[in-house]
Image (spheres, grey):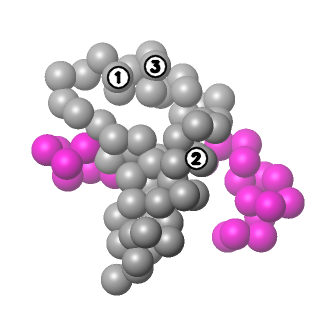
Amino acid sequence: MANPNRLTPNAQNLRKSMTKEERHLWYDFLKSLPMTFNRQKILGHYIVDFYCDRARIAIELDGSQHYSPEGNAHG
């Protein structure tokens, strides 16, 4: 299992700098649902874009960041 403390600063930074696609999904849909969704949730070795514990669902968006040189380097 990954050390969550190692991932926490990265998750916090990702929350502050959401992509256009993440902002659209969060502000136009997920935020208004009756279930709680967390942004940039640490799950094991990964940080998922959105997570709902009650529904046990993780949402990962493929946005423009995946097509940058840095995004391509990460997978």
Residue sitting farthest toward the right:
69
Which tag, 3 or 2, sits closer to the chain's start?
A: 2
Q: Are marks 3 and 2 in contact (CB under 8 Å)?
A: no
* Mark 2 lies on residue: 14
Residue 1 higher or lower than 49, as above or below: below
Which quadrant holds the C terminus?
A: bottom right
Q: Is residue 60 visible?
A: no
Label 2: state its secondary structure.
helix
> How far apart, in angstroms, are the residues tagged by discs 3 and 2?
16 Å
Q: Is residue 33 left or right of residue 28?
A: left
In the rendered image, residue 67, in percent from the top left (x then y), is placed at: 78, 52
Q: Is residue 68 visible?
A: yes
Give the residues drawn in magenta, as a range: 52-75
* Residue 47 or residue 64, whichever sits in front: 47
Q: Is residue 63 left or right of residue 24?
A: right
Instruction: Point out which mark residue 31 bears.
Output: 1
Amino acid type for the residue under numbered disc 1: Lys
Which one is in front in this view, the residue at disc 1 or the one at disc 2? 2
Q: Are marks 1 and 3 in contact (CB under 8 Å)?
A: yes
Which tag, 1 or 2, sits closer to the chain's start?
A: 2
* Mark 3 lies on residue: 27
Label 3: state its secondary structure.
helix
* Residue 30 or residue 42, whichever sits in front: 42
Q: Is residue 6 left or right of residue 31?
A: right
